[in-house]
Each structure stands twice: as structure tokens, then as C-alpha cells.
Amino acid sequence: MILIHINNIPQSLSEPTSLEAVILAQNIALDSVAIVLNAEVVPRNRWQSILCQHEDKLELFSAVAGG
């Protein structure tokens, strides 16, 4: 079992899973979020190729319009 943290909330994965698949499983639109993985911003073009590892820490950020 792979344990990751998404915005400090523990989540378990049964197998290695791409960042993109993790985001989709959270019902989040891919074009509405930025990912920081272990304190490093991950470019969107790498989300499919990076697999989550045990104890990874993901921070998800979404843009908010306002003034």
C-alpha cells in the first residue's frame, strides 16, 4: 500500500498511480489546479509520467478570481 498526503490529508493508493490519475480520482478538473509535490512545483506536462511514491506530499492549488 502506498500512503500519500493531499493537502495534509492521508490517502492510500493500492498501486503506483500517476499524479494526473490522483487528481482525476479527487474529481478535480485538470485545468483548474497546480500541483506541488514534496515542495516542488510539477509542470503539467509531467503529471502523467510521475508516479506517486510512499509518503509523498501533494499540495493542490487552484486559481481564484477576485479583486
Image (cartoon, helix red, strand yellow):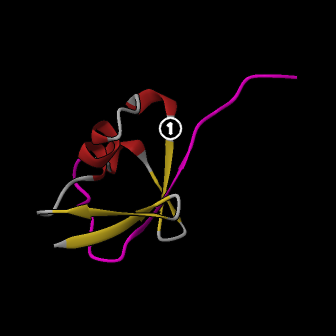
The amino acid type of the residue labelled 1 equals Val
Rendered view: 43 above or below 40: above
Q: Residue furthest bottom?
A: 55
The N terminus lies in quadrant: bottom left
The kind of secondary structure element at disc 1 is: loop
Please tell me in which quadrant of the rendered image residue 45 appears.
Answer: top left
Q: Residues within 10 Å of mark 1 (few under 14, many from 20)?
A: some
Which percent across, then down, holds residue 40? 51, 65
Residue that badge 1 annotates: 33
Which percent across, then down, holds residue 18? 23, 53
Q: How many marks?
A: 1
Magenta range is 48-67
Q: Residue furthest right?
A: 67
Is residue 1 toward the left or the right of residue 3 in the image? left
Give the residue drawn at x 50%, y 30%: 32
Is residue 2 toward the left or the right of residue 36 in the image? left
- Assign the magenta stretch its main secondary structure: loop
Q: Is residue 55 magenta?
A: yes
Q: Nearer the viewer, residue 27 or 40?
A: 27
Give the residue drawn at x 35%, y 40%: 26
The C terminus lies in quadrant: top right
Please tell me in which quadrant of the rendered image residue 13 appears.
Answer: bottom left
Which percent across, then down, holds residue 4? 34, 68
Q: Residue furthest left?
A: 15
Give the residue drawn at x 29%, y 71%: 3
Which percent across, then down, holds residue 44? 40, 43
